[in-house]
Image: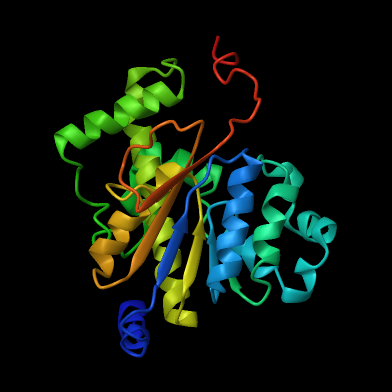
């Protein structure tokens, strides 16, 4: 049975009011955002967690009994070498749903670099066309996304890099959506997704891919901002937390 057919079978057995997917955005280094995610995961009691921060190989190492020991879990995952913020911020999310099956959806650096040469479709694999990765973006969206990448990198990127940066972002969104589809097919849901706000946005992030692949899904999207700053891209709800005291992100570029 194909993944899509299996998902359709699972969804047909769910109550009509079931919430299939809850996408919880974040600013990665804000502990208040992770506390909010943990609280919502605890309330949802998902059967699956999909995380941008883990590869599928890392996710496969996690067992329910491991989640009780944050230090051992971080060591097993090699978290300290991953580049993500302190594991102490993320561990409560796992602890909030210790029985959930864990799915990793991280695109490795090697895969991301390859996209600059081959494009996102080849890196994604056989389902690339179904996810829209073989199609160019509309011109206005491409331009908007390139401008966002330039701003996110302090206006320091060579312009010729921008199409590749957008292609990598498209791949990451699609990989997250594919992991959600797999999680639904294998567990029946609900599925909670932990990811950055950029991947959570409805207009071109993970929800847009899910709408393309499985338009009948009930998807809720939370965005989390700081100091009331607006979030672009469309969210079902947006909440704010105090900003984190962090170094100037543009200092390295200067």
Q: In this view, does 185 lie to the left or right of 129?
A: right
Q: Residue at x 31, y 25 (%)?
A: 147
Q: Residue at x 57, y 74 (%)?
A: 45
Residue 195 x %, y %: 50, 51
Q: Against 78, is 114 above or below?
A: above
Which residue sits furthest top? Answer: 254
Q: Is residue 220 left or right of residue 90?
A: left
Residue 62 x %, y %: 70, 68
Q: Is residue 233 left or right of residue 46?
A: left
Q: Which residue is drawn at 46% across and 74% down?
A: 190
Residue 231 x %, y %: 38, 37
- Which is more toward the observer, 96 or 238? 238
Q: In which quarter of the image is the C terminus?
A: top right
Question: Can residue 46 be seen at all in this image of the molecule?
Answer: yes
Determine which quarter of the picture holds residue 131. Answer: bottom left
- Which is more toward the observer, 32 or 104? 32
Total number of numbered labels? 0
Which residue sits furthest bottom? Answer: 13
Q: Against 69, is 248 above or below?
A: above
Question: Can residue 103 be seen at all in this image of the molecule?
Answer: no
- Which is more toward the observer, 81 or 219? 219
Determine which quarter of the picture holds residue 66. Answer: bottom right
Q: Against 16, is 222 above or below?
A: above
Q: Is residue 90 left or right of residue 47?
A: right
Residue 234 x %, y %: 30, 46
């Amino acid at each position: 049975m194909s993944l899509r057919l299996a998902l359709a079978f699972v969804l047909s057995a769910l109550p009509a009011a079931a919430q299939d997917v809850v996408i919880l955005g974040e600013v990665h280094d804000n502990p208040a955002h992770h506390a909010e995610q943990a609280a919502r995961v605890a309330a949802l009691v998902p059967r699956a967690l999909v995380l941008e921060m883990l590869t599928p190989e890392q996710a496969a190492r996690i067992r329910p009994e491991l989640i009780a020991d944050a230090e051992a879990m971080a060591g097993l995952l090699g978290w300290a070498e991953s580049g993500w913020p302190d594991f102490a911020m993320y561990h409560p999310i796992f602890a909030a749903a210790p029985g959930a099956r864990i799915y990793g959806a991280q695109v490795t650096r090697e895969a991301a670099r390859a996209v600059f040469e081959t494009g996102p479709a080849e890196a994604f694999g056989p389902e690339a066309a179904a996810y829209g990765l073989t199609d160019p973006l509309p011109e206005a969206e491409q331009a908007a996304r390139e401008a966002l990448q330039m701003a996110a990198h302090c206006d320091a990127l060579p312009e010729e890099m921008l199409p590749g940066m957008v292609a990598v972002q498209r791949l990451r969104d699609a990989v997250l959506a594919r992991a959600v589809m797999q999680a639904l097919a294998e567990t029946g849901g609900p599925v909670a997704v932990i990811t950055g706000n950029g991947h959570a946005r409805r207009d071109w992030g993970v929800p847009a891919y899910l709408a393309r692949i499985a338009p009948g899904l009930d998807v809720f999207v939370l965005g989390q901002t700081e100091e009331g700053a607006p979030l672009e891209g469309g969210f079902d709800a947006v909440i704010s937390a105090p900003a984190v005291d962090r170094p100037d992100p543009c200092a390295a570029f200067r």
